Amino acid sequence: MNKSAKKSGNEDGDRGGDRTRAAGKIADRRVQDRRVQKTRKLLSDALVALILEKGYDEVSIQDIIDRANVGRSTFYSHYENKEQLLLFGHEHLRALSLRDAGRPFEFLPFYRHLAEMHELMGKLLSAEKSERVLTRSLEDILQGSICRLYAPRLAPEEGALFMLRCEAAAAALVRLMTSWVHKGMPCSPERMAEESTALLQRVLADERAVASGRTRKA
């Protein structure tokens, strides 16, 4: 075998080894990700069960780790406190609410989730501390989503008033949602989604008109 052929063979071997090592790292990350997801689900399921049994305020971290059968260090490797664990259950709502500018905002996933979790939501909203944590989380999700939908259309000088309107809209929407839960969900999720859309349009009417006018001028 000449030197060039030998060198080529070595290079092919090196590339093959690199690919194998890269594939191994990807596989390891996937296994680790599955373990993380499994642990977080165990902790979340434990918290939900305990809330339904005795209420959020009475649940301790020790209760959670005992129910989930994990160590305290495992809990703190994922969450700083039980508030963070509670909010983990709303991450899928955050993902569902993400919309690019120009696409319609969808409230139906929020209401369907609330309807599916009506017993848990009732417990959370009946205690002062858990109600505060939950409503703040929902307001953050909604405010961020509203900003992503409308902010790209506005001029910089309109930003301050727009942010105030976003905060007001998010607070009003969350009040509508929580009142619906408190009153036993008398309307369907579809009807409440329509009401929320109408409310958002009224609160942000000026921003929609300004954005529309700027688009036509452009």
Image: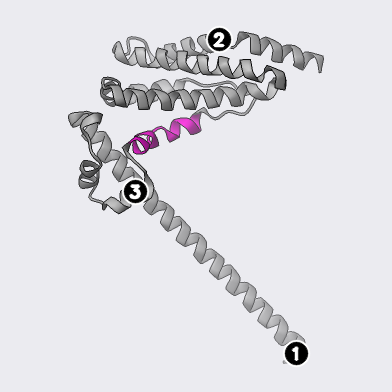
**Amino acid at pointer 1:** Lys
Is 89 drawn above or below residue 79 in the view shown? above
Nearest to the observer: residue 188 or residue 196? 196
Query: Which residue is farthest left?
Result: 53
Q: Which residue is mark 2?
A: 203
> Gap between marks 3 and 1, in whole Å?
57 Å
Q: Secondary structure at mark 2?
A: helix
Q: Secondary structure at mark 3?
A: helix
Residue 121 in sight here: no
Measured from the top left, where is residue 158 in percent x and y?
Answer: 68, 17
- Residue at left offset 34%, top offset 35%: 83
Please say whether residue 85 is one of the residues in the magenta stretch: yes
Nearest to the observer: residue 214 or residue 95? 214
Nearest to the observer: residue 111 or residue 40? 40
User: Which part of the image, by quadrant, shows the C terminus?
Assistant: top right
- Residue at left offset 42%, top offset 57%: 31
Give the prevailing secondary structure in the magenta stretch.
helix
The label on residue 3 is: 1
Tell me which corner region of the image, top left, top right, bottom left or bottom right, holds residue 147. top right
Q: Nearer the viewer, mark 1 or mark 2?
A: 2
**Amino acid at pointer 3:** Tyr
The label on residue 76 is: 3
Magenta segment range? 83-96
Q: Earlier in the sequence, mark 1 or mark 2?
A: 1
Please tell me how many numbered marks the rendered image carries.
Answer: 3
User: Which part of the image, by quadrant, shows the N terminus?
Assistant: bottom right
Measured from the top left, where is residue 57 in percent x and y?
Answer: 24, 30
Residue 72 in sight here: yes
For disc 1, the neighbor class at 10 Å (few under 14, some 14 to 19, many from 20) is: few
